[in-house]
C-alpha cells in the first residue's frame, strides 16, 4: 500500500453519501429484526403444524374486530409516516408536524387497544401459568397458543414503544427547526423502522386473529 | 519503494489520541474508535481474570477425585460463570471490539467508523450486560451451564437465571451494534483505490464476523427471551408438560452459538494472516482463496448447529445432514492452514513474539480442528459427547487458537496502540510458557474424554486421577504465562522505548501513520495503488 | 390530506394505502366464510402482499439500487436457513 499524492483530508463524506450510509445502517438493523421476529414465526409454524387444534381454539377466543381495527390503525399510521417523509423532502414543515403527530397518535391508539385486549385475557384467565383456565374441552396444551400470543404481540408492542420514542424525537427535532429538505435523514431512518414494525403486525394479524376462522 | 504522505510543513504535529485529553470524561464520552477499543480492552481483561479465577478454582478442586474441596452446587456455578464470562464477555468481544475497533478505520484509511456514537453506545450496552451478569454471579450464581438448557433453566433451577440471561441478552445488542457498524464502515468508508481485493485479510475477517454477529445474535436474543418468559409464566413452549419441546431451545440456542464460535475464531484467523505475512516477509499465499474461505466459513457455519445435538433425540436424518455439513465447514479452515504454511515456505522467518503466537495458533488450531471432525462423526460423537474430549477440543480452538491469536495481535499492534515497544525476550518467554502450559493442561483432557470422564463433574473415578493432576499442573503454568504480559506490557507503558511508526517494517495503512496515531488517524486521506502484503523475502 | 406530489413516477401514497385497506378487508371478509384449508394460505398471501406494498412504496425499496435490496433480502434468506434446517428435524422425527 502506498500513499501517493496528498489529498486534503475530507472530514466527513458528502451529505448524499452520508445518507446512503445511514440507510444502509438501518437496513442492516432491520435484517437483524427479521431474524429476531422471524425466529418466532418459525417457532409458531412448528407448533401450528404440530397442534393445529389449539390454534383453532385460541384463534376463536381472540377479539376479531379489535384486531382488524388495530391493523387498519397501524396501516394508517404508516401512511402518515410516509406522508411525513414526503413532507420533509418537500420542505413542508407544518405538514411534517401534523403527519408526525398523527403517526404517533395512531400508534398510541394501537397500544391502547392492545392494552385493553391484554387486560381482557388476564380477566378471562387466559394467561399461561398456574392460573390458566381454558374453555371447556381444552387441555393444558392451549397455553402454548397464549404463550406465543403474548410473546409475539408483546415484543411487537415493545417495538412500537421504541417507535413512538423515535417519532417523538423527530417531532422535537422539527420543533427545533432541524429538519428540512436539506436534512431529511432522521425522518427516512425512523420511517423505515416504523414501516417495518407495521409489517410485523401485518403478519401477526392473520396468524392470531384469523386462525381457526 | 514507499512514500509516506507528510503533513504540510509548518503545521504543528497533531496530538496523538492518547494525549488529546486526560480527564475521565474525555475517555468515557469519547467518540474516537481507538479510545473505545481501549475501553473494551480494560473491560474484557477484567472479565477474563474473573473467568480465569473460576477455572483455577475448578482445576484445584479436580486435583482430587472426591469432591472434597468444592461441593457440587458451587462447582456447577463455577463452570457456568467460567463459560458465560469467557464466551460472551471475553472471547466474542476480544479481537473485534479491541483490535477491530482500534484498527479497522486505520486499515481502510478512514478517520473513524461509520457510526461513532453507536460505537460508544455499544460499550455502554456491553457494560450494562456485564453488570447484570456480575450481579447474578455475586447474588449466588447460576448452575445451568453457559448453555442454559431447558427445562432445567426454565423450570427447575434455583439460580439467578433471569438476571444472567438478561445480562447476556443485553450484551448481545452490543455485538449487533458492533457488527452493524463494521459492515457499513467497510462498505462505505474505504480510502480511494482500496478495492475489496486490496483489503488486508484482517478486514475480510472482521467483515465476515460482522455478518455472523448481525444475523445470529438476534436468534440468541429471542431464545433467551423465550426461556425467561417461560420462567416467568411458569409454563411455556419448552415445557413437555403442556406439549412443548425442550429440544426447541437447543435448536434455537445453537443456531446462534455455533456461528458464535466462528465469531470467535475468524478475527483470530485474520490476525494470523497479518502476522504470518509480516514475519515471513511474504505475501499471503492464495490471497483470494483466503478471502473466499473466510466468507465460506461464515456461511457454512450457519448450517451445522445440529452437531451439538446428535444425542439429544433430534431426528437421525437431520443428524446425518448436520454431520455432513460439519465435515464441509472444515474444508475452508483447512485451506487457510495450508495457505499459511505455504506462505511460510521459503519466507524469511523472524521468530518475534507475535510470530511465536501465530505459529502456536497454526499448530493448536489444527489439533482442535481435527478433533472437531471426530466429534462431527455422529457414531463417534455418541461416545465422546459430554466428555472431556469435547472440553479439550473447544479449548484447543478457542484458547490454543483464538486467545493465542489475540495475544499475537496485541503484541504486534502494541507499538501502534501505545507508542511503546515491549521487552521482546519477556514476550518470547511468556509465549513459550503459554504454549507449554496450554498443552499440558488440555492434551490430557483428550485422553480423559476418550477414556470416558464426563465433563461438568465435580468428582470423578480414581482411574482419572493422574491425568487430572497433569492438567492442573499445566493450568498453573498457563496462568503464569498469561500473567507475564500483564506485567511487561504495563511496564512498557511507562518505561518502554518509544515506537516508530513502523517498527516491524510491515505493509498496511495502519503503519503509515505515527505510533500512537493522531486522533484523526491520518493527516491526509491515503490513496491506495497496490494490493496488501507487498513484502519481499530478501529485504531486511 | 393534500394529494401527495408524485416523485419519479411513483404511485400516489393514497393509492397504495387504499390497496392496503382493500387487502385487509379481503382477509377480514374471508374469515366469515366457513373454515377451509385454503384460508390459512390466503391469509398469509394477503399479508405478504401488504408487506410487499409497504416495503416497495412506503419504505421506497423500489427506488433503491445496489446494496440495500441485498441487505433487505439477506435477512429473509438466513431466516430461511433457520426454518428449513429446524423443520428438517421435526418433520423427520416420525412422531408429528
Image (cartoon, coloured by chain):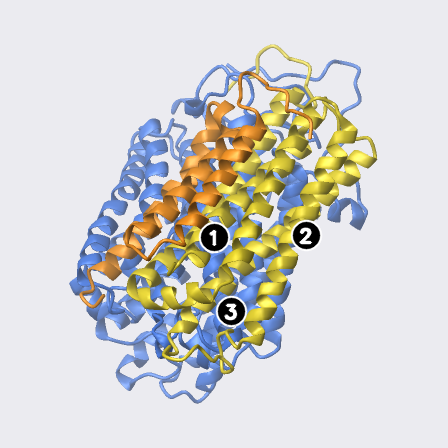
Asked if labels 1 and 2 touch by Cβ distance under 8 angstroms, the answer is: no
Which chain shows up in blue? Answer: B
Whether residue C93 is visible: yes
Whether residue B89 is visible: no
Q: Is residue B72 above or below residue B204?
A: below
Q: Residues within 10 Å of mark 1 (few under 14, many from 20)?
A: many
Q: Measure how far apart labels 3 and 1 are at the Cα level.
A: 25 Å
Q: Where does label 3 land, which residue?
A: B228
Q: Is residue B221 above or below residue A77?
A: below
User: Mark 3, chain letter?
Assistant: B
Residue at 35%, 28% in the rendered image: B287
Which chain shows up in orange? Answer: C
The image's mark for residue B297 is: none
Q: Where does label 1 land, which residue?
A: A205
Which chain shows up in yellow? Answer: A
User: Mark 2, chain letter?
Assistant: A
Say whether disc 2 or disc 1 marks the residue closer to the N-terminus. Answer: 2
Q: Where does label 2 land, which residue?
A: A108
Amino acid at each position: 500500500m502506498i500513499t501517493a499524492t496528498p489529498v486534503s483530508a475530507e472530514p466527513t463524506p458528502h451529505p448524499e453519501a452520508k445518507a446512503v450510509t445511514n440507510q444502509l445502517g438501518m437496513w442492516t438493523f432491520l435484517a437483524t429484526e427479521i431474524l429476531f421476529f422471524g425466529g418466532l414465526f418459525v417457532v409458531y409454524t412448528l407448533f401450528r403444524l404440530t397442534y393445529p387444534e389449539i390454534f383453532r381454539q385460541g384463534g376463536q377466543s381472540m377479539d376479531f374486530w379489535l384486531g382488524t381495527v388495530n391493523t387498519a390503525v397501524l396501516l394508517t399510521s404508516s401512511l402518515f409516516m410516509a406522508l411525513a417523509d414526503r413532507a420533509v423532502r418537500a420542505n413542508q414543515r407544518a405538514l411534517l408536524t401534523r403527519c408526525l403527530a398523527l403517526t404517533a397518535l395512531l400508534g398510541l391508539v394501537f397500544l391502547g387497544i392492545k392494552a385493553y385486549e391484554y387486560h381482557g385475557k388476564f380477566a378471562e384467565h387466559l394467561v399461561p401459568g398456574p392460573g390458566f383456565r381454558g374453555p371447556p374441552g381444552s387441555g393444558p396444551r392451549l397455553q402454548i397458543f397464549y404463550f406465543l400470543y403474548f410473546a409475539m404481540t408483546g415484543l411487537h408492542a415493545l417495538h412500537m414503544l421504541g417507535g413512538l420514542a423515535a417519532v417523538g424525537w423527530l417531532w422535537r427535532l422539527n420543533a427545533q427547526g432541524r429538519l428540512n429538505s436539506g436534512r431529511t435523514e432522521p425522518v427516512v431512518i425512523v420511517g423505515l423502522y416504523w414501516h417495518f414494525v407495521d409489517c410485523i403486525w401485518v403478519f401477526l394479524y392473520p396468524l392470531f386473529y384469523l386462525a381457526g376462522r | 519503494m514507499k512514500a509516506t504522505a507528510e503533513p504540510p510543513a509548518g503545521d504543528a504535529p497533531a496530538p496523538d489520541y492518547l494525549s488529546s485529553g486526560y480527564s475521565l470524561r474525555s475517555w468515557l464520552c469519547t467518540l474516537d474508535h481507538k479510545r473505545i477499543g481501549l475501553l473494551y480492552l480494560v473491560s474484557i481483561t477484567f472479565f477474563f481474570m474473573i473467568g480465569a479465577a473460576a477455572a483455577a478454582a475448578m482445576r484445584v478442586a479436580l486435583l482430587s477425585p472426591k469432591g472434597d474441596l468444592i461441593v457440587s452446587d458451587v462447582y456447577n456455578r463455577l463452570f457456568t460463570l467460567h463459560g458465560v464470562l469467557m464466551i460472551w464477555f471475553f472471547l466474542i468481544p476480544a479481537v473485534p471490539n479491541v483490535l477491530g475497533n482500534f484498527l479497522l478505520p486505520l486499515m481502510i484509511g478512514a478517520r473513524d467508523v461509520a457510526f461513532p456514537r453507536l460505537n460508544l453506545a455499544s460499550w455502554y450496552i456491553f457494560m450494562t450486560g456485564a453488570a447484570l451478569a456480575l450481579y447474578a454471579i455475586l447474588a449466588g450464581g447460576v448452575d445451568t451451564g453457559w448453555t442454559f438448557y431447558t427445562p432445567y433453566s426454565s423450570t427447575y433451577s434455583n439460580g439467578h437465571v433471569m438476571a444472567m440471561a438478561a445480562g447476556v441478552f443485553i450484551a448481545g445488542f452490543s455485538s449487533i451494534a458492533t457488527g452493524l457498524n463494521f459492515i457499513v464502515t467497510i462498505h462505505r468508508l474505504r480510502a480511494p483505490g482500496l478495492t475489496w481485493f486490496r483489503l488486508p485479510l484482517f478486514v475480510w475477517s472482521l467483515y465476515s464476523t460482522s455478518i455472523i454477529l448481525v444475523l445470529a445474535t438476534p436468534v440468541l436474543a429471542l431464545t433467551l427471551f423465550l426461556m425467561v418468559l417461560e420462567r416467568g409464566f411458569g409454563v411455556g413452549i419448552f415445557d413437555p408438560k403442556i406439549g412443548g419441546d425442550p429440544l426447541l431451545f437447543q435448536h434455537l440456542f445453537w443456531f446462534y452459538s455455533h456461528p458464535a464460535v466462528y465469531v470467535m475464531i475468524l478475527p483470530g484467523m485474520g490476525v494470523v494472516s497479518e502476522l504470518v505475512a509480516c514475519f515471513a516477509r511474504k505475501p499471503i499465499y492464495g490471497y483470494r482463496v483466503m478471502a473466499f474461505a473466510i466468507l465460506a466459513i461464515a456461511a457454512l457455519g450457519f448450517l451445522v448447529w445440529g452437531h451439538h445435538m446428535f444425542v439429544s433425540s433430534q431426528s437421525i436424518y437431520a443428524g446425518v445432514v448436520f454431520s455432513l455439513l460439519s465435515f464441509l465447514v472444515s474444508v475452508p479452515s483447512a485451506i487457510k492452514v495450508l495457505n499459511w504454511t505455504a506462505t511460510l515456505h521459503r519466507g524469511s522467518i523472524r521468530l518475534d513474539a507475535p510470530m511465536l503466537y501465530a505459529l502456536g495458533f497454526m499448530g493448536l488450531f489444527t489439533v482442535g480442528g481435527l478433533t472437531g471432525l471426530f466429534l462431527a462423526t455422529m457414531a463417534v460423537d455418541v461416545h465422546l459427547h459430554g466428555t472431556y474430549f469435547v472440553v479439550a477440543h473447544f479449548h484447543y480452538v478457542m484458547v490454543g487458537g483464538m486467545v493465542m491469536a489475540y495475544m499475537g495481535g496485541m503484541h504486534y499492534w502494541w507499538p501502534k496502540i501505545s507508542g511503546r515497544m515491549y521487552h521482546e525476550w519477556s514476550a518470547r518467554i511468556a509465549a513459550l510458557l503459554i504454549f507449554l502450559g496450554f498443552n499440558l493442561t488440555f492434551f490430557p483432557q483428550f485422553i480423559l474424554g476418550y477414556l470416558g470422564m464426563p465433563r461438568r463433574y465435580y468428582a470423578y473415578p480414581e482411574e482419572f486421577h493422574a491425568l487430572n493432576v497433569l492438567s492442573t499442573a499445566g493450568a498453573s503454568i498457563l496462568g503464569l504465562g498469561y500473567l507475564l504480559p500483564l506485567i511487561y506490557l504495563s511496564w512498557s507503558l511507562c518505561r518502554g522505548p518509544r515506537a516508530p511508526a513502523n517498527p516491524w517494517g510491515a505493509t498496511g495503512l495502519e503503519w503509515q501513520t505515527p505510533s500512537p496515531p493522531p486522533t484523526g488517524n491520518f493527516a491526509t486521506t491515503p490513496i491506495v495503488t497496490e494490493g496488501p502484503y507487498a513484502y519481499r523475502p530478501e529485504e531486511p | 390530506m393534500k394529494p401527495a406530489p408524485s416523485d419519479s413516477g411513483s404511485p400516489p401514497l393514497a393509492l397504495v394505502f387504499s390497496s392496503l385497506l382493500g387487502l385487509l378487508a379481503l382477509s377480514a371478509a374471508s374469515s366469515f366464510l366457513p373454515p377451509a384449508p385454503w384460508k390459512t394460505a390466503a391469509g398469509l398471501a394477503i399479508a405478504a402482499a401488504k408487506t410487499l406494498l409497504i416495503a416497495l412504496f412506503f419504505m421506497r425499496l423500489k427506488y433503491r439500487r445496489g446494496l440495500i435490496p441485498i441487505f433487505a433480502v439477506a435477512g429473509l434468506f438466513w431466516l430461511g436457513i433457520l426454518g428449513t434446517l429446524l423443520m428438517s428435524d421435526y418433520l423427520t422425527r416420525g412422531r408429528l
